Image: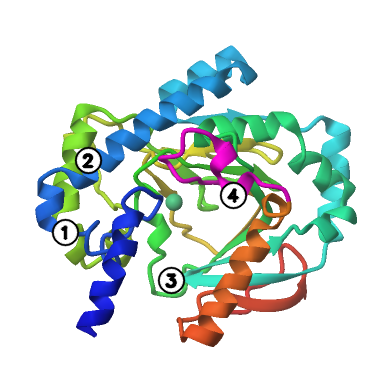
Amino acid sequence: MQIGRILRYPLWALEVLGPTKSFARNPILGSPRLNRMGLHVWRLSTAHRMAAMRRARLGSRIDPDQRRAFDRDGFFVIHDFLPADAWRRLSEETSALRLPAREIREGQTVTRQLLLTPRTLARLPQTRAVVGGRGINDLVRYAGATASAPVWFYQTVIADPARSEADPQTELHSDTFFPTSKAWLFLHDVGEEDGPFAYVPGSHRLTPRRRAWEHRASIDAADDPRSNHRGGSLRLGAEDLEEMGLPAPVRMCVPANTLIVADTHGFHGRSPSPRPTVRVELHGHLRTNPFLPTALLDAKSWPFIRDRQLDIDAGMHEFAVRRLGARRKWHWTGPVALDAPASV
Ligand SMILES: [Fe+2]
């Protein structure tokens, strides 16, 4: 046991210069002593400096007004994103859609993903046009501070407040220690009671007060009772926002055909749903190794891999469950409609 642990130290050391964020699973990243000496803050500051360099190269592709708003707030909100014709075609395409999906339950909420493989996209011309669009991908790349390839899929969020277990994604949190982006093109209106996305404006910036808060949080994060916090997705409350001089989160109640793209290093969360809700969106993710100077070094941007990122992720999860005895988080369903009830 002890020898196995010693043999893993070189790997853990290598992870210091990568995207690994878990304080609990990597004893170097979680070391109270090293974090008191500034290891976490060094990773945070270096990753932000690298991100600023990469993001500056991507800025010319963004409308100047939108760019100013993003730099101030940490998110883009674009109403009526698709022209009326394209929106009608996308609505028709998605209402007829039946695809195998995978589902994960987190407390009272189930998240379903319908993977968009190259083969699936070949049958969905309007979806393909949207996810292949230069404009939408430029926004996701700017928010994620990398020219790498976003991954797109249909996502359904099904909340059932009758179940007592809390949804950990409703806690205000930062996804990781470096800029990273998520995008939502909402297929239905999202009202006050539909669990809207909430974001703390300006919380994507690394200010001296944020750095001080992260330093303190990193020292005992590995032993925190909240598993996501231990895992490097730091949770916080209203008193922490006050300490950092940040405002309260804004809840983004938006009509269908609104695109939101956010740097989810900034503090955000799903708002709790007081009633049963089903929220459907075309969803994008983009996360890279924050220490890479250029996306050319990121395998996710390489041909063959870039269009199959979720397939590869799903395959690795299956391998870990079947061969390595890992706990199954994702459960496969047969072909389902986007708004079908949850099956886990
Ligand atoms: Fe998140």
Residue 31, numbered circle: 1
| Residue 30 visible to an observer of this rendering | yes
Of 250 and 246, the residue lying toward us = 246
- Mark 1 is on which residue type? Ser
- Mark 3 is on which residue type? Gly
Which residue in the structure is indicated by mark 2?
Answer: 41
Residue 4, numbered circle: none
- Mark 1 vs 3: CB contact within 8 A: no
Q: Residues within 10 Å of mark 1 (few under 14, many from 20)?
A: many
Of 202 and 251, the residue lying toward us = 202
Label 2: element kind: helix
Q: Residues within 10 Å of mark 3 (few under 14, many from 20)?
A: some
- Mark 4 is on which residue type? Ala
Residue 277 pos. (x, y %): 58, 61
Which residue in the structure is indicated by mark 4?
Answer: 299
Which residue in the structure is indicated by mark 3?
Answer: 107
Residue drawn at x 57%, y 79% as measured from the top left? 319
Residue drawn at x 56%, y 19% as measured from the top left? 59
Mark 2 / mark 1, whichever is N-terminal: 1
Q: Looking at the image, is mark 4 or mark 2 nearer the viewer?
A: 4
Residue 332 lies, with reference to residue 309, above or below; the image says: below
Q: Quadrant of the N terminus?
A: bottom left
Q: Residues within 10 Å of mark 4 (few under 14, many from 20)?
A: some
Label 3: element kind: loop
Gap in angstroms between the C-alphas marked 2 and 1: 13 Å
Q: Looking at the image, is mark 1 or mark 3 nearer the viewer?
A: 1
Q: Range of the magenta residues?
A: 285-303
Left or right: residue 47 versus residue 252 is: left
